Structure formats: C-alpha cells, structure tokens
Image (tube, rainbow, N blue to C red):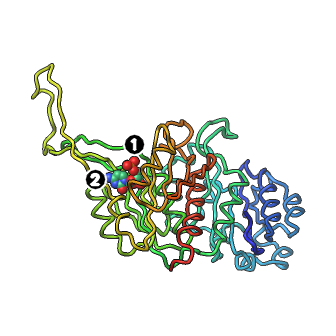
Amino acid sequence: MGTSEQRRIVVAVTGGIAAYKIPELVRGLGRAGHRVRCALTPEAAHFVSPLVLQTLSGEPVRSQLLDPGEEGSIGHIDLADWAELVVVAPATANVLARMCHGIADDLVTTLLLATRAPVLVAPAMNVNMWNHPATRDNVAALRERGVRMVGPETGELACGWEGEGRMAEPAAILEAAERCLRAPSLRGRGVLVTAGGTVEPIDSVRSLTNRSSGKMGFAVAAEAALRGASVTLVAGPSHLPTPAGVRRIDVETALEMRDAVLRELPDASVVVKAAAVADFRPRVVHERKLKKEDLAPDQGLTLELVRNPDILEEISRDRGDRVVVGFAAETHDVVEAARRKLARKGCDLLVANDVSRGDAGFDVDENAVTFVWPGGEVEELPLLSKAQVAGQLWDRIEKRLLGGRE
Ligand code: C5P
C-alpha cells in the first residue's frame, strides 16, 4: 500500500535493542518509493550498524550534532526542514522524556525540536518503564501535541520480561508512516463517533454496564482526526487517552449519550456508533445504597429494567445525506445477526465482530471484523490491530459512502 509519490522521511534511531530491526524498516520505506535519511543517537550505533543503514538508504547517516564534516554536508536544521515525516524507531523512554520536555542535547532531539514535519514514534522499552507514571505522562503529553504513536506491542521483551513494550513490527511502522503521509482526505468534514459502554445506575454505588474498553471507537475517532476530519467523540467511562485533535464529551448513561449525540448531530456528516450502549436501565434509581440487611436472609432482589432508546435506529431514520455506521458485537451466527440488525436499524454499513473469540474484541488491541452492507454483501477482514480496522473502515466510508458527496 504505497503512496504514489516519493516522500522524504527521516528515520531517527535511538538506543534500544529493537534498533536491529530498523534496516528492515529503511528497506521497506525505500521499496515503497520514499527517500530515507537516518539520524542516530550515539547509543543507537551500539545496536545497529550505521554502515548498513547508509547502504540501504543510499544516503549519509548522521549521528553527531556538532561534527564539522557532517554539518558541512547536511546541517541538522536542513535535515529537520528536509523531512516530510520523522519516524522515531525505536523510541526509548529516555527520548520520549526528552521530546516531552523540549530537551535538545543530541542530533536526534535537536532535529525533533526543529522539525515542523509530523512525527511518528514507535516506543520500545521494558514493560515497567512503559508503565511508569513518568512515561505515561510523557506519552499523554506527546499525543496531545499531535505526535503519533505506533505500538508498543505486548509480548516477550529482550530484557526477559513479558508485557507491553515490544516495538511494533517494521511492517506496522511502515503502514503507520504511510498513513501519516496521506493527504487529509476528510478535511472539512464533521465526524461524530461514540465509544465505550454506558453505565446505568441501580443505586448510589452500583450500576449495570456492558463490557467495552472503548478501544475500537477511540481508534475510529483517532483515524478520522488523522485524515483531517473535525471529530467529536462521545465516550462512556474510559481511562483511554483522548486521541490527538479529537474533541471528547464524556457521558455515563445511554440517555446522556443520546442527548450528546442529538446535540452534536447537526455538525456531523458521518456518524460511527461504536459504543456498547446498554439496552436496558433500572426503572428506579435508588438514591441511597440498597442494603442486604433490609431484606430477609432468603429474599432476593428484583430489579425492574426499562428499555433505553436505540440511538442508532433513531439517527438512521431521518439521516438525509448523513452517513451512519453501526457496530455489532455478536457471540454466534455473527453475519446473520448483523444482517438482521442492519435491516432493523437502517444504517449504511454495519461492522460486526465476534466477541466470543479470545484473541479479538473486548479489551484487546486486535479485532476481527466483518463489514455487512445493505445490499447483502459481506466482507470478512483478517485479525488486525484496532488502528488497522479503523483505517479499513474509513477507506470504505470514503470510497463507497462519501464518494461524490460534499
Ligand atoms: O442492538 P445492539 O446494541 O447490538 O446494536 C449495536 C449498535 O447499535 C452499535 O452501533 C451501538 O452503538 C448502537 N446502539 C445504539 N443505541 C442503543 C443500543 C445500541 O445506538 N440503545
């Protein structure tokens, strides 16, 4: 999936063991038709040979900030200005911290402070370093500033630990780089996305909810923002960071979600409803905690539930030119159930996922979805990251649903 034009990419390599995979990334970027120049921190050269990078990129490799020889050929500011994209891979906890605080004490961090190009980072580190509050804060601040992230993935780490911290594979970094370089195809469009589960209170301390991490909807919102849309995300309770460039409205109940969606609807030309909205809510919400001591020892508790409004059905009904996409989490007969749901809800596309699979769906970073179209057509996608699923979804919305529409 190469972009048609040749683009200028700086690959900034920092000192992590995953640097040994960078020659493959440089090769892939070259094969996709791009020009690549590598910049290394002094530590990076312990993990990957500058000569290999130079040979594969066909361009001089730089590692010194103040080397008169190197500065003479391409000054660090020239390199920062030359880049149409800077990819930092692997990105250590240290470089993320220095980026976050604007420290420019070597070639890579100086380049990162000077460039006006978009920056994509592929973090790689020990799981405890990744989970450290300092790194979490740095990552959140960088995201907020528009720095894009790919990975890290979960698995075996070079330090012997298992967990989140593996650098994304070169193919995934390549794909993320292509996404960063793509023209903002949704510029000028208002997009409304819902995500997460709603929470329906029973009393002041208990509630009913649907299992949903919100990851899929957040990825859909993030991808739309990357494509230049003006995105509003209506989210049920979730600890996920707000994607860069996205306006977030937090809600708790289905009724609050409905209010927020109806209020934001006039500005949206596309609505993607990825939220797991509770279908029912307790008819009565007790103001104080219900106490078991108030019941006889053998007495159960009966809750009366009433139907929540179906927001998707409601907004699909009089949608005019607006594109409306729904999601469906199913555990069996996934496609058949999705077809029926599509007919009942009347939306333009339904994205079905089988949540009975252990490797996809709830709370994990991957999803295996099937696109179900109103004409009966069904497209089954392989297991992909949620970011990739979001990319595939927006590709289809753009080509098949927005084609020709202003
Ligand atoms: O009927 P079900 O909840 O499985 O349908 C899933 C789709 O409908 C999702 O897109 C979800 O966001 C949407 N939905 C809704 N309002 C509801 C229930 C579901 O918008 N009350």
Q: What residue type is disc 2 on? A: Thr
Q: Is 308 located above or below residue 109 in the figure?
A: above
> How many numbered marks are there?
2
Of residues 204 and 344, the one nearer the viewer is 344
- Which residue corresponds to mark 2? 253
Residue 237 in view in this figure: no
Residue type of the residue flagged with mark 1: Arg
| Relative side of 213 to 370, left or right | left
Residue at 60% x, 52% y: name it. Answer: 379
Density class for disc 1 (Cα within 10 Å; few <14, some 14-19, many ≥20) is: some
Q: Going from the N terminus, do you reach mark 2 or mark 1 first? A: 1
- Residue 397: percent from the left, percent from the top? 54, 66
Which mark identifies residue 211? 1
Residue at (75% x, 80% y) in the render:
78
39 or 266: nearer the viewer: 266
58, 356: nearer the viewer: 356
Q: Are marks 2 and 1 in contact (CB under 8 Å)?
A: no
